Every structure is written in structure tokens, then in C-alpha cells.
Image (cartoon, rainbow, N blue to C red):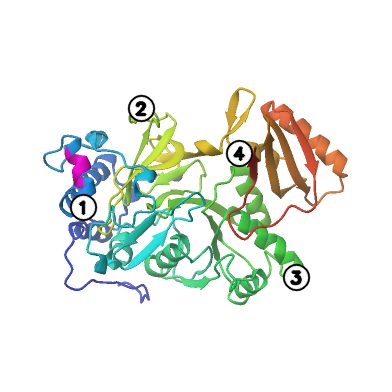
Amino acid sequence: MKGQTHKMTVSIDQHSSHLEQFKDFYEQLDDEGKTIEKLPRHQVEEYQLKAVNATLNHVWEHNEYYRSRLEEAGFQDPEIDNLTQLSKVPQLKKDVIRGDKGKLLCVEPKEIGQVHLTSGTSGKPIYTSYTLADQYVYDLLPKYEELFKEKEEDITAIALPYEFALPGLGFQRLFQFAFGTTVLSLGKGGYMAPVDKSLELMKEYQATVLTTTPSYAALLAEESEKYGIKIGEDIRLKKIWLTGEGCSSTFRERLEKWWGCEVSFFYGSTECGVIGVECSNHKGYHIMEGHVKVEIVDPASEEVLPYGKTGEIVVTTLLREGMPMVRYRTGDLGKLTQSICECGINMDVLELRGRQEHMLRLGAEDYSPFLIEHFLMEVPEAGLWYHLKLEQGNLTIEAEKFRTNLSKRQLAAKIKKHMADRIGVECKVVIRDDIPRTFGKATRVFTD
Ligand SMILES: [Zn+2]
């Protein structure tokens, strides 16, 4: 007999959607005590093909833009015979939908339950509309119990923005409805979200899980010392989920040491929702194949690339009725491999490489800022706040001291030598003690 639970089951009255058919698939998995994570590949692919076709049908019937693109590409029926044929479906670029709230809408406007916007640091935002059923029914169908160990007894602190973008509310729903945890909605950066109050709340309620960005996890740890709240004693976390900003694996490991718990990455976006999650082996993100079909394409030729090749990440959402994303070009770079992960999860593994426009050109080569961060973080005396400044092809690293008696000059020399040894990059190093802390997205890279 199942124990009592306060997990909530939402049903949508008088609702018919192309997604109803997938309830059976997930109910059967539940009954068998399985999740999609360890299913044999052919079963996952069967499900994905069915879900892609259901989505293609749905957008064909309910959206002019999608339909005309499919017709232009020669489709007479919105149907593919196998997942490889997805490559025949036109790709969707951000520019096409930027600033246009209706272009991809597949339901009547009155059926929209929730609107989210991308932060829109460059130009007009991208609007995404969800029906209530999208967020409270279909989005919660796939379970990933191998990846998420959160349970009803957990207290989850969510230190992510709740305004405009998806992350805060998205995690709120995930933790409350899928896992039944208690949620502390700390927010991040807003005027109702002071750092000291956030730390006090985590202490008061004995938070066990924290979801936030890498830079904010560093800020909370740092500020706790100022307010006399001891991490590991007053706040004892079991797990931190990082999202929203990328960071290197060494930055992640530094946070693990500081917080004394496992820290894992979560990759998603406001447009596509969940995309990938790291397992405890930390060797990349397992693709959340219940929610999305991910492809890697050559950004120039648009050709689909095989496993092992780096290209742009293209996402097709599988469980959306309001505004499905079909072959959406995320702008993020990465490569896929088949899972041979020791965790036993069969879902493909994604290695994320950041964005092309964020690459730093040093000499004749492009470097991901995360790679440079990775080597910088290997120097234990370097702090978690830093700037990378690129001027006329010359790199200056501005860093702070971290719990060390080294002089500024000694630390600068040490970092300079380490960077030259590890990646062969000659750079100037300046040790500062006033690198600004940010509540928003951390800006660490400056180029001329
Ligand atoms: Zn794994």
C-alpha cells in the first residue's frame, strides 16, 4: 500500500489534447515501477517518434506558420516514419519568433495559462505561452527518479528569479508537484529577496536542497560568513542544483567543497523547459528524453551531426500544446554521445560547450570561457569572482584572493604560470579585492 502523500494530481476538466494519449504510456511505466531513464533505447525511440508525430500533427492543424514551413519543405502529411526523418522538418531560428508573441501559438489566446519571457539581454524578448495543462499535467508526466532523489521530507530553497522567465516557477512546480517537497521561494535579485533573509530562512527551516545559479551559490556561501551563519552546521544541504548560467566543473567542485554537498547541473531554457540533467557521475547531462528530442546540427549547413560531433543544440519539445518548439535552434553548442554511463541511465549524454558568440579568440584559437575558468579555479588561492578581459587579442584575468596568505604579487605570478602551463595562454593577471558581486546573471567576460 502506498503511504500518504501530499503530492498533487491535477486534472483538467473537459480538456482534450493531442497529449492525452501519452498518459497511458507513463501510467504503464508507473505501474511497472519504471521510469523512462533506464528503458531500452528502442522503447524510448518508439515513444519519441510517436510524440514527435503527435506534435507535428498538432502544429500542422493549429498553427499557420508551422504548417506553411512544413508545406514548403514538401510535407503533405505532418508525419515522419523514423526519427532520422526529423531532419526534413524545417529548423526554427530565434530571430523568427523574437518579439512575436503569436507566431507559434497553437491554442486560442484565452487558453493560455502562463506567459514567460526570455531575459532578452539582446533586443526583443522571446515570448512563450503555456496552457495550464502543459505545466500542471503533461510537463509532470515523465518521472526521472534516478536523477532526482528529492522526496517529500525535503525542504527546497529556490533562489532563482520568479519574474518573467521560467526558472523560479518551473522549479517551484517540479519540486512541489513531482516530488512533494516543501518549497522556500527565496527568489534572487528582487527587492523582496535580501541575501541575509534568504540565508536565515534556509537556516530556520533546515533547507536540504538549494536550486540557484553558480554565481549566486557562491554569493550565498560568502555572505553566510558575514552574517555568522555556518554552512555545514546551521545550514546542512544534501544537494544543490545549478542552472541559469554555465560554469566549469572545477567551479562546481569548489562549490561542493564550500557547501559540503553534491552539486549538479541542470540545463534548460525558458523556451524549451527542461533539456538535460547531470547524474552523480558528472560526466555530462542526460537528455530528458521524455520531454525533448535533441539533435546536434552544423550551424552553417544545418545538417544533423552524428554522435561525438560538436554543433548547435536543436530541441523539439514533446509534451506541449500551447506553444511547442519544433527543431528550435538554441544557440548553445554541444555534442551528444550514447550513454555508457555507470549510473545505468540510457538517456543520451550531452556535453555543453557554451555559446559561439561567447568564445574568446586567443591567438588562432577559440576558447570557451568555461575552459579558462576551469584552469583558473584549479588555483585554490583564486576566488570564485573573476573577470576575463579581452582587448586586442590579449587576455587579462582579474581575480581575487581566497583564504590565502600569498601576496597579490605572488598569487598573480602563480595564476599566470598555471595558465601558461595548462593551456599555453599568456595572460596578464591583476589581483583585485573589489570585484563586484551581482544578483543578476554574473558578467565575467568583457571583450572589446
Ligand atoms: Zn549517468
* Disc 4: which residue: 369
Residue type, label 2:
Ser
Where residue 429 sits in the image (x, y, percent)?
A: 78, 37
- Residue 156 appears left or right of 31: right
Q: Residue at x 42, y 29 (%)?
A: 308
Q: Residue at x 71, y 60 (%)?
A: 222
Badge 4: residue crowd in 10 Å (few <14, some 14–19, many ≥20)? many
- Residue 398 appears left or right of 154: right
Residue 301's label in the rendered image is 2
Q: Residue at x 34, y 45 (%)?
A: 96
Q: Residue at x 55, y 70 (%)?
A: 186
Badge 1: residue crowd in 10 Å (few <14, some 14–19, many ≥20)? some
**Front of the two marks 1 and 3:** 1
**Front of the two marks 3 and 2:** 2
Residues at discs 2 and 4 in contact (Cβ within 8 Å):
no
**Front of the two marks 2 and 4:** 2
Mark nearer the N terminus (1 vs 4): 1
**Mark 1 CB within 8 Å of ligand 1:** no
Where does the magenta region start and end? 67-71
- As helix, strand or loop, the secondary structure at mark 4 comes to helix
- In this view, 173 is above or below 46: below
Is residue 120 visible to us here?
yes
Task: Give the Cα separation between the discs numbered 3 and 2.
Answer: 55 Å
* Disc 1: which residue: 63
Mark nearer the N terminus (3 vs 2): 3
Residue type, label 3:
Gly
* Disc 3: which residue: 228
Task: Give the Cα separation between the discs numbered 1 and 3.
Answer: 56 Å
